[in-house]
Image: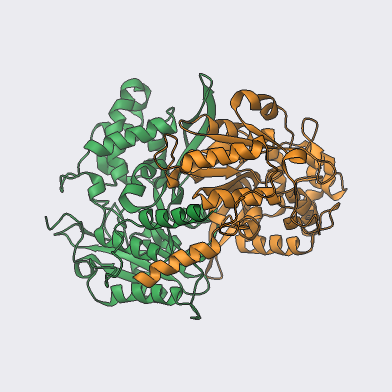
Chain colours: A green, B orange
Amino acid sequence: MRHFFMFTLLTLALTAPVARPALGQSDPLPSWNDGATKRAIIAFVDKVTKQGSPDFVPPAERIATFDNDGTLWCEQPLYVQIVFAVDRVRTFAATHPEVKDQPLFKAALGGDLKAVLSVSAYDRLQFLATSHAGMTTDEFTAIVNDWLKTAKHPRFKRPYTDLVYQPMLELLAYLRINHFKTFIVSGGGIEFMRPWTDSAYGIPPEQVVGSSIKLKYELRDGQPALFRLAEIDFVDDKAGKPVGIQQAIGRRPIAAFGNSDGDYEMLRWVTSGPGPRFGLIVHHTDATREYAYDRDSNVGRLVKALDEAPERGWVVTDIKNDWNVVFSWEKE
Amino acid sequence: MRHFFMFTLLTLALTAPVARPALGQSDPLPSWNDGATKRAIIAFVDKVTKQGSPDFVPPAERIATFDNDGTLWCEQPLYVQIVFAVDRVRTFAATHPEVKDQPLFKAALGGDLKAVLSVSAYDRLQFLATSHAGMTTDEFTAIVNDWLKTAKHPRFKRPYTDLVYQPMLELLAYLRINHFKTFIVSGGGIEFMRPWTDSAYGIPPEQVVGSSIKLKYELRDGQPALFRLAEIDFVDDKAGKPVGIQQAIGRRPIAAFGNSDGDYEMLRWVTSGPGPRFGLIVHHTDATREYAYDRDSNVGRLVKALDEAPERGWVVTDIKNDWNVVFSWEKE
């Protein structure tokens, strides 16, 4: 059996973290400026990983959950999935003229993205569900992959998957090398994220929790397939996040990372458990390198979680001051 | 960083598989008799793990899904969760007299377990949901743990968690040491399984997929909690299994293990994908050491999957002939 075992270890070493610091490198978070935020992250990881410490947490219980939009990648000026859906709506409406009179389709077809943003997460998900119903999960994955190859961010003129935050990649890698299991817990559609989270973040499909639409198993031409229905299964946002965590992971994480009030309940659920806990909010304060927004934004609105951060012990990351790099390519 | 990395490897070595064969031991499946079934298992694992082979599957895609009842542990004479629920119904009915007239409660309170078994999986889950509604997920976990400490199997006079199949533990360990990720995909309640699957099988909560009831996040006395509702969320049985796999795992497994027609759709979904695939049915043929049942059983009925096994290339494990041990303690 020895060769199997060594192969397992080798594979783990080769595949586990993305952007893992080289062995022997002293700073695991080089894109984070020295300061209170970085010290708080390292102090937490040190105490839960120190054998014999009263705060030691066994590796299996080191679960960390990350919001996606605005926490791991850029969500401005519009959630990427909305841009995707609006791009897709024309294709869908061409073969389903009956949807043209539905308010959200009408708005999207007319380019009124504010209207699309102003509705609830539930209504938005219903809109997405309708516009991608009837296809198989494999077909949907192919469409997402194709779209991401060509779509570009309107300001940065780069593929959206280039707009992941370098400091957060380092944080994910730092947690994983300390034997944390890292999950995405996003209000975004689970099937929209899974095609690219592994290559972008080192987070495999089975560690992605998100909003979902109902699926149906059927034989088509004698071959099994999973079809997307025009019906919401679950909205993984706000009070849905702790529920999504429990249904998918089955235990309470010890660390949570978010950036908006959509993450408030997840942060409370995670940080109110027994033992050492860590909550962090990414606060978008840098209009030069990225965007500056919080209370008045339709995208990633942050009010309550920011106001309550001090009393709840949540660490607030100030992008302008805490991150010396936002995107890996910005110094090119 | 080196000490983190070494610690990670050490932890993996210490914690990963249950009942892992000792390094250097030549037979990874000692409880399996030499024969076609064992050879088929080993041949599949060999070909997908052999670097450079046309059938090589990268470790991250080595997903294997296991049914639980009748595949990993004994399900006769009654699904364990039904025994649990019937035990709990008296407690529940004492404080909720209005349920006494509902047919399934009436049957359960009167000891008519055949009636409980004769209804659909959906109706049975609704019965379970009702009898455990209103409590938090933590309270439910504590009740399951307490019950498992004292409840005993009527024939074997042992705790139910002693009734896991030793050959299947070896198979799980063998797959894991070959870098498979092993999941349970069961019609049973997800929250009923998660408290004990890690100690029984080495399968952590986040790798358990099952039927679920709806949960609600609420503050109680200012503290966040997840409450169980009296409403079904998802039935992970028959055509629900491929759906549950997709929602929870997000990719198609390459190997599936089941024992009843409830696993038929999972077996078809898994074994009809591209590349090397493996499907296995545990056929209960040994009334002396365990139970013998298939076509006529209300528990774990096996008709269609058995009939189609030859044409679909599914391996049928004949317990009587293929397993030299069923339970680890039987030779004590």
Instruction: Classify residue A52 as left or right of residue B195.
Output: left
Q: Residue drawn 49% across and 66% down?
A: B11
Measuring from the top left, give residue B298's x and y in whole percent.
Answer: 79, 36
Q: Which of these two is toward me, B87 or A27? A: A27
In this rendering, position of residue B276 left or right of residue B70: left
Figure quadrant of residue A93:
top left
- Indicate whether B251 appears above or below A27: above
Instruction: Find residue B53 and report its horizontal and vertical position in percent.
Output: 42, 37
Q: How many marks?
A: 0
Along the viewing direction, whichever of B329 and B36 lies nearer the viewer: B36
From what the image shows, is residue A329 above or below residue A145?
A: below
**Quarter residue B194 falls in:** bottom right
- Residue B299 or B25: which is nearer the viewer? B25
Q: In which quadrant is the C terminus of chain A drawn?
A: bottom left
Q: Is residue A62 visible?
A: no
**Along the viewing direction, whichever of A91 and B172 lies nearer the viewer:** B172
Report the residue at 44% width, 51% height from top.
A207
Residue B34 x/y as whole percent: 68, 41
